[in-house]
Image: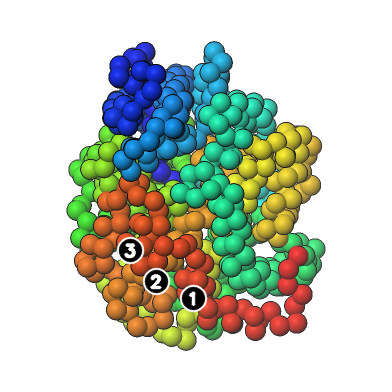
Amino acid sequence: MTIKSLALASALALLPAAAQAAEPTAADAKAFVADAEAQLSAYSDKAQRVFWVNATYITDDTDAMAADAGAEGTLLQVKLAKEAAKFNTVTGLDADTARKLFLLRQAIVLPAPDAPGAAKELAEIATRLQSTYGKGKGTARGKDVVGNDLEALMGTERDPKVLQEMWESWHAVGKPMAGDYARLVEIANAGAKELGFADTGAMWRAGYDMPAADFEKLIDRLLAEVQPLYTDLHCYTRTKLNEKYGDAVQAKTGPIRADLLGNMWAQEWASIYDVVAPKGAGDVGYDIGELLVSKQMGPIEMVKAGENFYSSLGFAPLPATFWTRSQFTKPADREVVCHASAWDIDNKDDLRIKMCIKVNSTDFVTIHHELGHNYYQRAYNKQSLLYLNSANDGFHEAIGDFAALNVTPEYLVKVGLLDQAKVPDASRDIGLLLRQAMEKVPGMPWTALVDKWRWGVFSGATKPADYNKAWTDLRLKYQGIVPPVPRPADAFDPGAKYHIPGNTPYARYFLARILQFQFYEAACKQAGWKGPLHRCSIYGDKAVGTRLNAMLEMGMSKPWPEALKAFTGSDQMSGKSMLAYFAPLHTWLKQQNKGQKCGW
Ligand code: ASP
Ligand code: SER
Ligand code: ZN
């Protein structure tokens, strides 16, 4: 996740005098945009610090300060969006001014209406939701466990009763959020309507350099491309879970019990690779978590290893302040938001990550993910304020994941983590691919459905009384999973996933899963790689790094197809690269599934 919080509310007159004339001109529009950028920049510098302190030190006081800053930002952004709309009919705009006016009108996550107090109420709700999540606890074997420990435990616990207890107790964290969430939807929708959108979801879908309706179709088209691979992975995994746990816990047919997949949300399944690994070929010979432990690497060394990868491509080292200002591990004495994120406090080089790092393979990948945000932020820091973002939000989430795809056995040897003698040979390719598929493929239906749920909620198609049912229904429809226990009438399971109380749009993660494979395939081609795709690592290839940087430094200054083309040569998002990566595994899965009734 990347943190982006533009906006401000100053009492300053928002328009330069000339723009207040009856018929605004192209020159007025340009002056307005420059002024808006200055105001947003001043706000951002101030607010980012407040949000950072709140997320790394949750108290009633920092909640109040964050809510104030949030309200100020919403007021400023909405005001600027409305002012920007006044230039809708102006002709002769230069391309940058037109693009920036569009961004000003549309790039707000949660708008508020003009009604007095609305922005304040919205910001208070948003802060309360995020802090409730941050402070959330569940239980395991009757003992209280904080959210991020519980998350990790879902990957290692194998007793279905305990898994059920952890899943159920954690999902109760969402329950008190239901009323707040319904109110948040009301306020944000009223704000979106005042800005000319049907609802907040429609506003979110409008941010992709294409008509909002086409964006929805694009998601469905991409999902349809990759869903057959998911269905086969689901089928194979279900068989293995049935073998391990027996019919009473996991039936041979139908959906999979959500708590058995090694992850609180069943979004990445690599933690149960040991359960599904085929005999022989499935022994891939190493586990990154174990390698880190055996080399006695701690959280900082893990981050250094991540930095080293980017340095090898020619990116400058992280600034000294990154090391002193980041939160790498969970402080012992206070509440924090552990969900990993990357920050660029001053929109220049005050880069930081906020994590509660554990020495395991999941966090090794997440570190690469977060650093991808930081390097992107620094690469585009010479752009003007409204362009300080990725080509589309999926790009931001994809860079670090693309980097982590290069963590191959051969790469691990080069950086001294794995002994050459332990490198798995080609006979282990199915195992390597299966482990990677467990990590990446379940994310496809999952990342598509989170915002399908929110789009329905924002449009009003899903009413508050049906919030939880709609969530459970989508989980069944797309992921083929069911809760381990019937859900109580007052459950609000979406609240138990950070990005719902955190109000982070989620379609970006779907796009990122598609894009990271496109970036990777293109990079490997540029590097002249000839072997199986999943064995390629561009580690140390400065020419590829230069070309990557050329895309990153564009920021949001051009429509995303241009940025995509700059690096990959194609201007289309496509699931084909992902399918190419997993092709040998998909063939193998189909063989394994012969005679099974796949689907649910
Ligand atoms: N903070 C990250 C995200 O939300 C975590 C992850 O990718 O695992 O983008
Ligand atoms: N980082 C995102 C999440 O935590 C996508 O994986 O859900
Ligand atoms: Zn991210």
Callout 1: CB less than 8 Å from ligand 2 = no
- Asked if residue 14 is positioned above or below residue 344 in the image, the reply reads above
Q: Nearer the viewer, residue 559 or 173?
A: 559
* Label ID, residue 521: 2
Tag 1: amino acid: Ala
Q: Nearer the viewer, residue 16 or 106?
A: 16
Residue 332 visible somewhere in the drawing:
no
Q: Earlier in the sequence, mark 2 or mark 3?
A: 2
Judged left or right of residue 354, residue 160 is right
Q: Are marks 1 and 3 in contact (CB under 8 Å)?
A: no
The residue drawn where x is 44% and y is 32% is 89
Identify residue for label 1. Answer: 580
Judged left or right of residue 464, residue 566 is left
Q: Are marks 2 and 1 in contact (CB under 8 Å)?
A: yes
- The number of numbered discs placed on residues in the rendered structure image is 3
Q: Are marks 2 and 3 in contact (CB under 8 Å)?
A: no
